[in-house]
Structure formats: structure tokens, C-alpha cells
Amino acid sequence: MPTKQIMDFREIEKILTEAFLKKRKLEIYYPRTETSIEGWRRVEPKSITTDIPPNGEVLVIGKDRLSPGHILNAYDEQKKEENGMRSFIIGKIRRARCA
């Protein structure tokens, strides 16, 4: 399956929920940003919020409904030297899998 193919949001939501509940790392395919190239990122999920921290309300995984506009806050293993914490807009995640 080509990497650029976008997964359905419901599939991504299911994978994110599984990773949180089972305390597993994720691999997400994310588009280019101002500071990163497009590609796979290996992350350790920390929270999902309604806005970028510290402004967002923290959602309860498995109870609150996720939307494409919510934010995945995760430790990015490739950014260790820069603190590693990153925020990803869930709706921009193209593919996801548990690591």
C-alpha cells in the first residue's frame, strides 16, 4: 500500500485509542511542517487535547469522542535533543500504526 494513501479518520482514531489504552508507541505518517519533512514519525502518545498546550482541554481516551481538529501531544523519538514533545493535528495524520 503506498505511503501517501490516506487512512480513514475512523481507522486512525481506533489506532490512537488502542495505543493509549495499551500504552504502546505509534508510528504516524505526517505531512511536511515548518520544522520537519513529510514522513513517518515514531512517537510515544502523552495526551489528546482540544487545542495546543497549555490552552487545550485534555480528553479522556476511550470516553471522549475524537475529532480531526483535536491535537495529539506526543514524545517524538527523532527530536530527543529538542525536548521531544510535539503536537500533531489528528486530522493531518495520513497513516498510523502501533509500533
Image: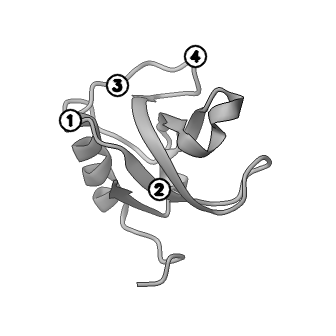
Identify the residue at the far front of this view. 81
Q: Which of marks 2 and 3 is nearer the N terminus?
A: 2
Q: Residues within 10 Å of mark 1 (few under 14, many from 20)?
A: few
Please indicate whether residue 30 sits to the left or right of residue 81 in the image.
left
Q: Distance between the residues labelled 4 and 3?
A: 13 Å
Q: How far apart are marks 1 and 2 (CA)?
A: 17 Å
Circle 4/circle 3 CB separation < 8 Å: no
Q: Distance between the residues labelled 2 and 3?
A: 20 Å
Mark 2, secondary structure of its residue: strand
In the rendered image, which residue does mark 4 sit on? 55
* Residue 6 at x, y percent in the picture: 46, 71
In the rendered image, which residue does mark 2 sit on? 28
Given the image, on which type of amino acid does mark 1 rest? Leu
Residue at the image position 40 percent from the left and 20 percent from the top: 58
Residue at the image position 26 percent from the left and 31 percent from the top: 61
Q: Which of marks 1 and 3 is nearer the N terminus?
A: 1
Q: Distance between the residues labelled 1 and 3?
A: 13 Å
Identify the residue at the far top of this view. 54
Residue at the image position 47 percent from the left and 43 percent from the top: 43
In the rendered image, which residue does mark 1 sit on? 21
